[in-house]
């Protein structure tokens, strides 16, 4: 799974990325500080199942704090997108190519209104404009892929009576579009989109088809960053009303980064996603540190319940992409051959079966699958059994 951070230049994408991953990257107050994409490991947060079995887990990947398990996935921060990026402006072509393999997008928007769509410092800019132009540029990207071949493609599909959904999926294979995705979009758009007569489609129909395909295959959540600034709440409420189809989450990436770095330095106890932190020794805080932590508590955590960063990551994986977390475990013992308790936890699509999970663990497990056992109920389940979030499953093979 790969999730891409998108947005105009200089809106806080790199700060969000560093807050989520603690990767050592450049954060600069000018456009295109990011040129080559940064890739790092971010984490979703779930309740670990170790407490239910009165044990303490030892994660092989990720980590666990006070019963909160953090499961890794890959996050990518790409160069900022400017208007007409689909025509090559700015770093547009590179930006779009970098995003091909992303399963979903997290768009960072500067709620302060102090950065325009080109990443330049301004006053009183309405951030909804950035959402609208970025959505349009990504749609135009999809349209462009179709238009390059549309006339020949549509005519051939008609004359040879090809499977239209299959043919479109092949054209978009580099963007992870499937035949089922195309069928869902055609069904949603209705009868006027006759897949047997694609040559009759207007330019407007082609754009709408590409747009709906993009929304389905590259879903996006909006991050209202810099929520602590003067005009932020006003702008947040306005864009929430203007873009009802998107979930817009208030966020202070800078505050999250400060808390995570303070925790890493041993200054505070803080679990990402919590609405509080604990200072270990107030006497060791400088005045600057004390003021900063007080500000974060009173203006961010007490008002919004969190900095928003962990909430965004969890929403993108569990709600937008509809994944679940499943633990491979044994009924008789929860440890692996080296004695590590519950070392693994995997993110898999909701609806996955016990057999799907067996193949996820190892091809041989899938090929030699006999049955699975739910470690909580101790009941055996078959290969078609659909797994649930936070299941513990043992796979038995022949």
Image (cartoon, helix red, strand yellow):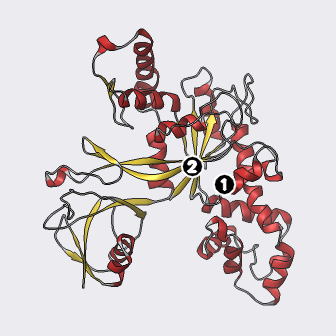
How packed is label 2: few (under 14 Cα within 10 Å), some, or many (20 or more)? Answer: many
Distance Cα–Cα, label 2 vs label 1: 9 Å
The residue lying at 69 percent from left, 84 percent from top is 163
Give the secondary structure at mark 1.
Answer: helix
Number of disc labels: 2
Is 304 displayed left or right of 65 in the figure? right
Residue 205 point in image, percent of width and height:
79, 66
Is 284 displayed left or right of 322 in the figure? left
Q: Which residue is mark 1?
A: 98
Residue that lies at the very extreme toward the bottom in this rendered image:
160
The residue lying at 75 percent from left, 44 percent from top is 133
Look at the picture and state if 333 lies above or below 267.
Answer: below
Between 397 and 150, the residue placed more toward the observer is 397
Look at the picture and state if 47 lies above or below 364.
Answer: above
Is 181 displayed left or right of 48 in the figure? right
Q: Is residue 384 visible?
A: no
Residue 203 point in image, percent of width and height:
85, 64
Location of residue 365 by image quarter:
bottom left
Between 236 and 387, the residue placed more toward the observer is 387
Q: Which residue is mark 2?
A: 76
Between 144 and 89, the residue placed more toward the observer is 89
Is 11 displayed left or right of 279 in the figure? right
The residue lying at 53 percent from left, 40 percent from top is 17
Which of the image's four quarters has the C terminus?
A: bottom left
Between disc 2 and disc 1, whose residue precedes? 2
Location of residue 391 by image quarter:
bottom left
Cβ atoms under marks 2 and 1 closer than 8 Å: yes
Residue 217 point in image, percent of width and height:
61, 62
């Amino acid at each position: 799974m790969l999730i891409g951070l998108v947005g105009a230049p200089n809106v806080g994408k790199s700060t969000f990325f560093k807050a989520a991953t603690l990767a050592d990257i450049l954060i600069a107050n000018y456009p295109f500080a990011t040129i080559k994409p940064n890739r790092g490991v971010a984490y979703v947060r779930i309740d670990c199942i170790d407490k239910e079995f009165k044990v303490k887990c030892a994660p092989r990947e990720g980590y666990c704090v006070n019963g909160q398990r953090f499961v890794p996935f890959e996050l990518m921060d790409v160069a900022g997108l400017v208007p007409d990026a689909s025509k090559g402006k700015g770093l547009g072509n590179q930006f779009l190519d970098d995003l091909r393999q992303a399963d979903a997008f997290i768009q960072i928007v500067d709620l302060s209104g102090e950065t325009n769509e080109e990443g330049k410092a301004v006053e009183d800019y309405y951030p909804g404009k950035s959402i609208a132009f970025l959505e349009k540029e990504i749609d135009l990207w999809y349209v462009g892929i179709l238009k390059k071949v549309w006339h020949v493609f549509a005519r051939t599909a008609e004359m040879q009576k090809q499977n239209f959904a299959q043919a479109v999926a092949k054209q978009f294979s580099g963007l992870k579009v499937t035949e089922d995705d195309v069928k869902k979009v055609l069904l949603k758009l209705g009868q006027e989109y006759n897949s047997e007569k694609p040559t009759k489609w207007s330019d407007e129909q082609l754009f709408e088809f590409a747009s709906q395909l993009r929304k389905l295959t590259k879903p996006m959540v909006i991050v209202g960053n810099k929520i602590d600034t003067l005009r932020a709440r006003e702008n947040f409420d306005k864009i929430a009303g203007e873009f009802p189809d998107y979930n817009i989450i208030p966020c202070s990436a800078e505050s999250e980064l400060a808390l995570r770095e303070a925790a890493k330095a041993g200054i505070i106890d803080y679990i990402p996603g919590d609405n509080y932190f604990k200072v270990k020794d107030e006497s060791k805080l400088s005045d600057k540190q004390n003021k900063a932590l007080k500000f974060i508590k009173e203006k961010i955590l007490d008002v919004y319940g969190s900095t928003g960063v962990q909430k965004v990551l969890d929403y993108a994986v569990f709600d937008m992409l509809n994944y679940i977390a499943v633990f491979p475990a044994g009924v008789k013992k929860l440890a692996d051959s080296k004695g590590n308790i519950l070392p693994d936890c995997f993110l898999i699509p909701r609806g996955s079966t016990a057999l799907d999970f067996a193949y996820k663990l190892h091809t041989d497990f899938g090929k030699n699958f006999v049955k699975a056992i739910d470690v909580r109920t101790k009941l055996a389940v078959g290969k078609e059994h659909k797994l649930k979030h936070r299941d513990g499953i043992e796979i038995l093979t022949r």
